[in-house]
Image (cartoon, rainbow, N blue to C red):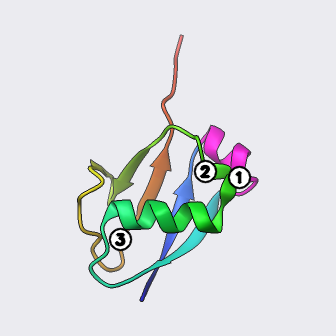
Amino acid sequence: MLTYNVLLFAGLSEACGQASLLVQVADGASVADLLRAAELVQAGLKNQTFRVAVNSRYVEASATLPANAEIAFIPPVSGG
């Protein structure tokens, strides 16, 4: 098992009441696996819209997570 410290940005951190969370997944897990596990750890993520960044790059749900990766959940932002 690998444990990732997932950073939560903007509205996600507000919805979850924390800036990060620890999520455990099996070795060789995909981003989709991480998302499912994260929702079990933090119910505030359900029904939220966000992208996943691994090592500062946006990735698709099918991407495999490397060990020791920096993971961030980033919601859409608006500017003005």
Q: Which residue is mark 1?
A: 16
Looking at the image, is mark 3 or mark 2 nearer the viewer?
2
Horizontal and vertical percent position of residue 41? 63, 68
Name the residue type under label 3.
Ala
37 is within the stretch colored magenta: no
Say above or below: 28 vs 48: below
Q: Which corner quadrant of the image does residue 35 belong to?
A: bottom left
Placement of 68 over or under 44, stated as above or below? below
> Is mark 1 in CB contact (under 8 Å) with mark 2?
yes
Rendered position, 76 above or below 17? above
Q: Magenta stretch: give its range.
A: 10-18
Quadrant showing the N terminus: bottom left
| Residue type for callout 2 | Leu
Q: Which residue is mark 3?
A: 69
Q: Residue at x 48, y 50 (%)?
A: 73
Q: Is residue 19 above or below residue 21?
A: above
**Amino acid beneath label 1:** Cys
Tell me the quadrant of the picture where the C terminus can be found.
top right
Say left or right for 6 vs 33.
right
Q: CA distance from mark 1 to mark 2?
A: 7 Å
Q: Residue at x 23, y 60 (%)?
A: 63
Q: Which mark is residue 51?
A: none
Quadrant housing residue 62: bottom left
Q: Which mark is residue 45?
A: 2
Q: Residue furthest left?
A: 63
**Residue extending furthest toward the top:** 80
Sequence-earlier tag: 3 or 2: 2
Q: Is residue 14 left or right of residue 76?
A: right
